[in-house]
Amino acid sequence: MRNQMILAIKLLIAFLILVTFCGMAMAFPYQEGWPQQTNNDVSSSPAIGDIDNDGDLEVVVGSSDNRVYAWHHDGQLVDGWPQATGGSVVASPALADIDGDGYLEIVVGSRDYKVYVWRYNGEIVIGWPQKAGGDVRSSPAIGDIDNDGDLEIVIGTNSFSDNAWAWHHNGVLVTGWPKDIGYYVNSTPTLADLDGDNDLEIALLSMGSGDVCVLHHNGSPVSGWPIKIGTWYECNDAAIGDIDKDGDLEIVMAAGNKVYAWHHNGVLLKNWPVTLPVGQYFGTSSPTLADLDGDGNLEIIVSDFRYSTPGNYGVYVLHHDSSIAPGWPIAKSAYGNPVAVDLDADGDMEIIFGSDDYGKVYAFHHDGTPVAGFPLSTGDIINSTVAITDLDSDGDIELIVGSNDDKVHVWDLPNPYDSKKIEWGTYHHDVWRTGLYGFVPPSVIYGDVSGDGTVSAYDAVMALQYAVGLITLTDAQKEAADVNKSGTVTAYDAALILQYVVGLITTFPAESKADAPALNATSESELLAKAIKELEVIHLDDEQKQVVEQLKRLLNRQPSPAHTTLLQNYPNPFNPETWIPFQLALDANVILYIYNIHGQLVRVLSLGHIPAGSYLCKEQAAYWNGRDNTGQSVASGVYYYTLRAGDFTATRKMIVVK
């Protein structure tokens, strides 16, 4: 009887433990469609973005099964994914529109010594993959490091030499790269304009030599750097932010049992470094910066994942003056980069991180007290950094993380989502992986000039009003209005926006749906005339018709060209027909004469008396059908055409090819 009672008590205790554990793990439900399975550990941190421009967010992550995955918000794989690499993918993907096509590209390194760049549909981008000097455990950082208007990709490699690399978006190496900064660069680069010269500087740690390096965009060292802090530290990334509110950026890094904070010139801040009673591997969880307590100063969050040494603690929060924040440290481990988010809408930041503690995800208030409903659990070690977003656009928060149980987990939290209350919401701060506090990757909805989230005829009106000088636009509005990526906002952009609204074109940045003439002097008036003609043949509502009428009035009052000009025919060479564009500074009687290579007159085109203006598109330019004055097709060869308009005469060459 006594043994039965003991057994019953043991079973009851086991049941209560199980209920308690499951209750903690399932305090928040999984998002519908999740978790999703891969075929090996997921140490890679998820990147979140609308890669296919369908208006919904996707989850992109690497796996140790040598693949990169992309899922829709509901857990369905994106068409074209997963994509295979030749090695495990422990690094975290970066998302950025590196080629300016309006879609996010997926950039990630693999342990097969290569860096890959894919389009949203899984197609490899031309110029990629690129081979680096060693296996790639570093995540790519994206930024316009040389201020040339295009994005570059910067990454470290696990090699003895040539261990820091920078490529242009097309796979061409940036001048001065790769660099040898020691050996074994597994840290993710951190990008920021440290010296105010409009170029980005790059901060990296050499794991083998213990050198913290800060490089200019051309690979040369910034004055005051490198700085040696020791040897053989794990994948420590730097974090950059103005922690002391002096108007300059500081570089923060944890290594060994110390946390460092330097001014941009390599001078240590007062009271730094800080020595903490932790194990050798302190700082493997790279620093996170956030104003946790709302006092306007940034706190630094760091962790030692070997916290279990007796008497040692794992997660620390330090004020900008190096003092330890009240309520900290906490004896928990954080393998990934902690994130800082106002999780419960109380006005203060919470700290969230995954751990090796049976795969738990912990969350603590800024004062170190636990957040209700946590921890969550994946059941296995979490090396991945948590990502916080509104994945399904329902207004509340989703928490996303990879795990060594081979899965990507997404929990649906009831708390309201507000992007302004996320100070460090993903690995290395943002999906460009810059590590720069406060940086927001530009996100443009092309055509949405008003900024209301939709593209409408009103946006076309705003673009047109700006083009003619009636209103001003912010830089962000001008970028949204410049839908053909010409660098300026014109009436043609307004026409393209209206074409998008009515379905004549379907993507931005855009060219006109009509065939653009292949000539050197393609002009605003030509393109605008084509766009108007396309719009006039379809059904429009009253507001859309008003935009078209405004465009037509603008086209008709285009100023006369300053000079009469004969332009190159198009196409050229041609068979059998071609168009000959020209511009008239004054009204004139216009005649075109066509001669063969022997100077014999082949055809005369009398165009009549024509008012001043530009005659560039097919509907307005002179047309030759490749026949002579008798109606016979001319032979292949070189021909010359001469324009006479009043006192003006000019001749150009063209080629007939059959």
Image (cartoon, rainbow, N blue to C red):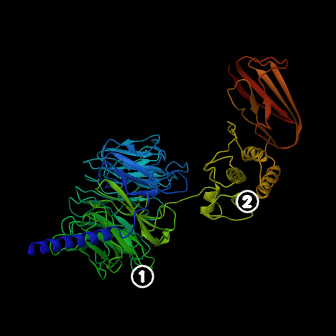
- Residues 289 and 207: in front is 289
- Residues 572 and 296: in front is 296
Specify whether 465 is left or right of 397: right
- Label 2: which secondary element: helix
Residue designated by label 1: 295
Specify whether 209 is left or right of 177: left
Give above or below for 468 relative to 111: below
Q: Residue at x 45, y 54 (%)?
A: 95
Q: Is residue 375 visible?
A: no
Q: Residue at x 17, y 72 (%)?
A: 8
Give above or below for 370 relative to 537: below
Residue designated by label 2: 461
Q: Marks 1 and 2, Cα distance to the nearest angstrom? A: 44 Å
Residue 264 x, y percent position in the rendering: 37, 67
Q: Which quarter of the picture shows residue 335?
A: bottom left
Quarter of the image containing the N terminus? bottom left
- Bin the neighbour count of mark 1 within 10 Å (Cα to Cα): few under 14, some 14-19, many 20 and up: few
Specify whether 42 is left or right of 535: left
> What kind of residue is marked 1?
Asp
Q: Is residue 15 visible?
A: yes
